[in-house]
Image (tube, rainbow, N blue to C red):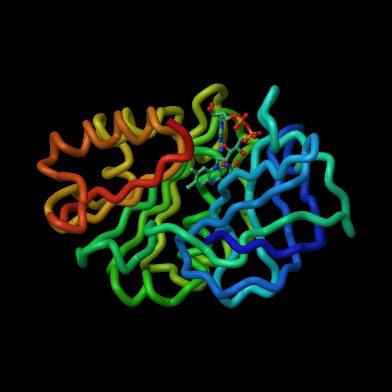
Amino acid sequence: MEEWQEGEIIENIKWTSNLASLKIKANIMPHQAGQFTRIGLMINDELVTRSYSYASSPQDELLEIIYINIPNGVLSPKLHQMKKGDKIQVMKQAIGYFTLDEVPDGENLWMLATGTALGVFLSLLKTPLPWKRFEKIVLVHGVRYQNELIYQDLIEELKKQYPNQLIYIRSVTREKAVNSFNYRIPRGIELKEFQNYADIEINGSSQFMLCGNPEMIKETSAALSSFGLKKNRRTSPGNITVERYWT
Ligand SMILES: Cc1cc2nc3c(=O)[nH]c(=O)nc-3n(C[C@H](O)[C@H](O)[C@H](O)COP(=O)(O)OP(=O)(O)OC[C@H]3O[C@@H](n4cnc5c(N)ncnc54)[C@H](O)[C@@H]3O)c2cc1C
């Protein structure tokens, strides 16, 4: 049964006109990096809830999510209006299986994110486990505009902390941006541009975690199948583990 807890908004960080992060103080159960929660507000006398990945890691004090303000969306425009001190409902127990426990061993781990899905990977990267399990980790963030390349300070810190392990790839599709590719994620893989940049081949010892836009997940999974990789299922382990944000 879902159990709810009242949380308090500590910060609503506006990165762009519609991309933001919420920091929430709430007395919730510990989560595992990679999981998501549900967040809710009373709208017209009804508790409206939506799922959000934890961008915070299990050791962080505040619950942090990255969200986009969807025009005509039901909940996200209300989130966008929230201010420090406002109250919000948070699910007490985290859910989801997009965790490293579900990912088989391999040499390299690729984390492919579109937009707000960067958060789930930041949560994972802030924990020691991926660095112990994989030789190299390639974080690919696909966005439309350069100003959506958020959390640069944290990514720089991680690069300093793991200089021989972390490879960070940015790809901006709707404008030219410095130090960035200009491909949608599946195209960057098909053209082997990302592999060349990372100096890593995709083969049976590669593990992939894909999160965000369902089209990216579909097309990237198809691109990866041409390298002989298949979906990772509990009953039949593979190389591609996915989390879709909508259908
Ligand atoms: C497991 C899971 C984790 C999720 N984690 C996040 C998260 O960390 N951050 C986040 O912003 N959303 C996340 N979502 C999506 C989120 O639950 C909501 O769908 C989203 O905030 C829109 O809610 P809404 O009520 O404003 O819009 P709705 O009226 O519910 O409209 C939904 C529509 O908005 C679009 N949409 C939904 N999410 C996104 C997105 N992230 N980026 C671009 N377009 C989108 C889709 O077209 C979708 O059909 C997650 C969804 C799932 C299932």
As rendered, which of 15 and 214 lies closer to the eye? Answer: 214
Q: Residue at x 87, y 55 (%)?
A: 86
Relative side of 30 to 5, left or right: left
In the drawing, does residue 130 fall left or right of residue 40?
A: left
Q: Is residue 118 above or below residue 146?
A: below
Residue drawn 54% across the image and 39% down it: 115
- Residue 112, given in percent of the width and then of the height, sits at 39, 45
| Residue 14 image point, x, y percent | 77, 44
Total numbered labels placed on residues in the image: 0
Q: Where is residue 170 drawn, in percent x and y?
A: 48, 42
Residue drawn 65% across the image and 51% down it: 39
Q: Position of residue 25 (x, y in %)?
A: 75, 67
Q: If the picture is divided into quarters, which one holds ligand 1?
A: top right
- Apparent side of residue 242 relative to residue 202 in the rendered image (left or right): right
- In the displayed structure, 165 sits above or below 195; it is below
In the displayed structure, does residue 144 sit left or right of residue 137? Answer: right
The quadrant of the rendering that contains the C terminus is top left
In the image, residue 227 sits, relative to residue 234, either above or below, namely: above
Residue 9 or 125: which is nearer the viewer?
9
